[in-house]
Image (tube, grey):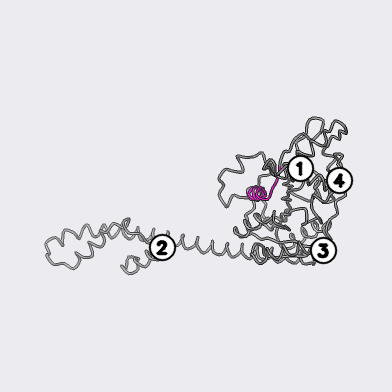
């Protein structure tokens, strides 16, 4: 059964948006026997540069390589990552956010759905205390063999790849492997969640393509920053000045905080725009219906007039100067050769007294 409530999608980056810091600051690389995380990321940057490769793919490949070190084999599994995810700290109010904002949505007459759109590891995000709060997690992840060992990157998400997931949410496609569903044409009114019902939360440069796309499509973008993080705040100011975002909020998800009040205001705006669109659609449909009805009446009148004109035609042939001749010529104009809009044609009919 089709959901009667309009859906509003809240789409989050993870690192720096729901959790402080970024993936590179976590100690999960220790899982593959790497003690110096800074050295690991330095090596990854060099590997990426030498091969002109994505840094996301490079670090995932490098982790597998390190885990298969014959001198110190450390096979990495899904559980390896989910266990590290359990230790990831979250911003203030995040753990209660989902329940509170879902309740707000019910009170406002909309259904809230939550999505992750991140370059981070899906397995680690699933391991956090909020891992089960999302409709779907779109993020980088590994491919595993039958023994559960990570053998190859399955999905690597960079800043441009993130926009793909917005289209998937728009169409209601969950699986990355569903290429046909992602690319096939779909009428706008058949899409599960319109772009103007989406709110994107991000914190940095990797989120800019998603933010710009949503704003262009009538959606909304919120930049999250830590008020004590000068570099992050500087980046946020840049997003504001470039008009890439609608709002900038301090990283506090507490009830009645900036983020909560901002999302509430956006939901109000979405509802008002929907009601406005509905009113316009009803007005336009009524105009079309009225026009078609008027045309039908006119066709009926034309049928009667044509019958009368044919009987009178014989009477006017003998008259050399009959004022009715001009009217006959008007009636014989092929209207398919003249293009009108609805109001112009109605005006034409009125002026010619055919209504």
Q: Which mark is residue 342?
A: 2
Q: Tell whether position 151 is magenta.
A: no
State which mark lies toward you, 4 or 2.
Answer: 4
Q: Label 3, secondary structure: give it.
A: loop
At label 1, counting other C-alpha atoms closer than 10 Å, the crowd grade (few under 14, some 14-19, many 20 or more) is: many
Please identify the quadrant where the C terminus is shown: bottom left
- Is 252 rendered above or below residue 180? below
Q: Label 4, secondary structure: give it.
A: loop
Q: Tell whether position 158 is magenta.
A: yes
The residue beneath circle 3 is 254
Percent across and percent down for residue 93 are: 83, 60
The residue beneath circle 1 is 59
Alpha carbon distance from label 4 to label 2:
73 Å
The residue beneath circle 4 is 36
Q: Label 1, secondary structure: give it.
A: helix
Disc 3 or 2, which lies upstream in sequence?
3
Q: Label 2, secondary structure: give it.
A: helix
At label 4, counting other C-alpha atoms closer than 10 Å, the crowd grade (few under 14, some 14-19, many 20 or more) is: few
At label 2, counting other C-alpha atoms closer than 10 Å, the crowd grade (few under 14, some 14-19, many 20 or more) is: few
The magenta span reads 156-170
């Amino acid at each position: 059964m089709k959901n009667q409530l309009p859906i509003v999608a809240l789409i989050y980056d993870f690192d720096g948006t729901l959790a402080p810091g970024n993936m590179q600051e976590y100690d999960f690389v220790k899982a593959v026997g790497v003690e110096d995380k800074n050295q690991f990321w330095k090596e990854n940057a060099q590997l990426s540069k030498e091969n002109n490769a994505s840094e996301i793919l490079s670090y995932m490949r490098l982790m597998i390589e390190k885990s298969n070190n014959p001198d110190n084999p450390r096979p990495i599994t899904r559980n390896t990552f989910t266990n590290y995810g359990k230790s990831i700290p979250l911003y203030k109010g995040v753990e209660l956010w989902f329940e509170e904002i879902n309740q707000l949505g019910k009170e406002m007459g909309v259904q809230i759905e939550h999505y992750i759109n991140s370059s981070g590891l899906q397995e680690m995000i699933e391991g956090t205390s909020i891992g089960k709060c999302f409709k779907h997690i779109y993020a980088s992840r590994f491919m595993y063999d039958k023994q559960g060992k990570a053998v190859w990157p399955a999905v690597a998400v960079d800043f441009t790849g993130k926009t793909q997931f917005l289209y998937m949410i728009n169409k209601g496609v969950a699986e990355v492997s569903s290429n046909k569903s992602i690319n096939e044409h779909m009428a706008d009114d058949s899409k599960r969640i319109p772009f103007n019902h989406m709110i994107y939360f991000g914190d940095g440069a990797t989120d800019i393509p998603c933010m710009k796309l949503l704003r262009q499509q009538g959606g909304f973008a919120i930049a999250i920053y830590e008020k004590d993080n000068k570099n992050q705040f500087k980046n946020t100011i840049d997003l504001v000045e470039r008009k890439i975002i609608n709002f900038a909020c301090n990283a506090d998800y507490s009830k009645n905080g900036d983020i909560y009040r901002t999302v509430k205001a956006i939901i109000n705006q979405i509802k008002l725009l929907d009601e406005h669109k509905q009113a316009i659609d009803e007005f336009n449909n009524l105009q079309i219906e009225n026009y078609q009805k008027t045309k039908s009446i006119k066709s009926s009148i034309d049928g009667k007039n044509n019958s009368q004109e044919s009987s009178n035609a014989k009477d006017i042939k003998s008259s050399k100067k009959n004022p009715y001749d001009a009217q006959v010529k008007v009636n014989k104009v092929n209207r398919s050769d003249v293009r009108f809009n609805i109001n112009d044609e109605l005006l034409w009919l009125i002026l010619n007294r055919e209504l």
